[in-house]
Image (cartoon, rainbow, N blue to C red):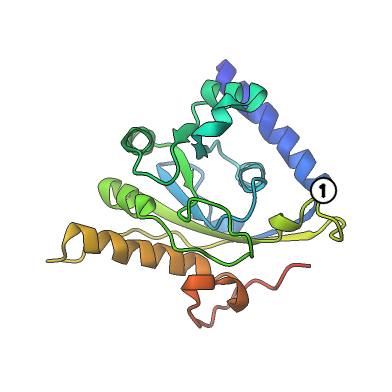
Amino acid sequence: MKFDAILYWMVRTASWVFIHLVSRPQVSGQEHMPRTGPLLIVANHLSWYDPLLLGSIFPRRLWFFTKRELFDWPFVGWFGRVTGQIPVCRGEGDRTAMEKALTYLREGKAVVIFPEGTTAQQEQMLTAHTGAAMLALRTGVVVLPVAHTGTRRILRLGSWIPKINVQVGRSFTTEVPKGMARKVSLQVITQEIMEHIAEMLPLEQRGVYRVEIGHPEEMQTSS
């Protein structure tokens, strides 16, 4: 095993221990996680703990879109460079980051993207960027939606060892509707992706994607 892989699994193990020390994670839908093959994982974004959480629950190695500023941090930046995480400039179209993600997906890797691009301060879903839709349409890979609640309460005053709920949804693929302009198709696919995430969240946390869809596995509000 190469050094970068050894390092990833060491940090992943440490993350698993840390997450279980500071929270009570409950995960459902693990049977929907593909163990091999190219995979685009899309999730709502609440806290900087989210990558640690997802990395610790998935049984395969993941590659994350990571804001470029973190690569200037002493250990975090070194870890990101060694393990090939994807630096991205937030708030602008980052072609280099998207091309790197496309390469990873074509190599059969599992890439994680938070389509909202930033954390939701009030645990409400925010309007997503179209990057995830572009990756899905350009590659045709399987998209795996993940919804979680509670990570904003980790290590916060008044929230002693909060419960974290994670729901892994059924994977799906996307395609461009016939006759639809590219820009419009990206918006349509983005909406589809975010609704897959939203329908697994409590209604009050769906924010701009407040779709009142009955879901048999709807998550309960975290405590």
Q: Position of residue 86 (x, y in %)?
A: 46, 33
Q: Is residue 1 something that shows in the picture? A: no
Few, some or many C-alpha atoms within 10 Å of disc 1 (few <14, some 14-19, many ≥20)?
Answer: some
Residue at left offset 82%, top offset 48%: 22
Residue beneath the point at 61% across and 44% down: 51
Q: Amino acid at mark 1?
A: Val
Asked whether, in this view, residue 221 is left or right of residue 140, the answer is right
Residue 94 point in image, percent of width and height? 35, 39
Q: Which quadrant is the N terminus positioned in? A: top right
Q: Where residue 141 appears, x then y in whole percent?
A: 34, 49
Image check: 85 left or right of 219?
left
x 78%, y 40%: residue:
18
Using the rendered view, name the quadrant where residue 162 is placed. bottom right
Outermost front residue: 91
Q: Is residue 115 visible?
A: yes
Residue plotted at (67% across, 46% down): 49
* 215 or 112: nearer the viewer: 112
User: Label 1 belongs to which residue?
Assistant: 22
Q: Secondary structure at mark 1?
A: helix
State which quadrant residue 139 falls in.
Answer: top left
Q: Quadrant of the C terminus?
A: bottom right
Is 203 positioned to the left or the right of 208 in the image?
right
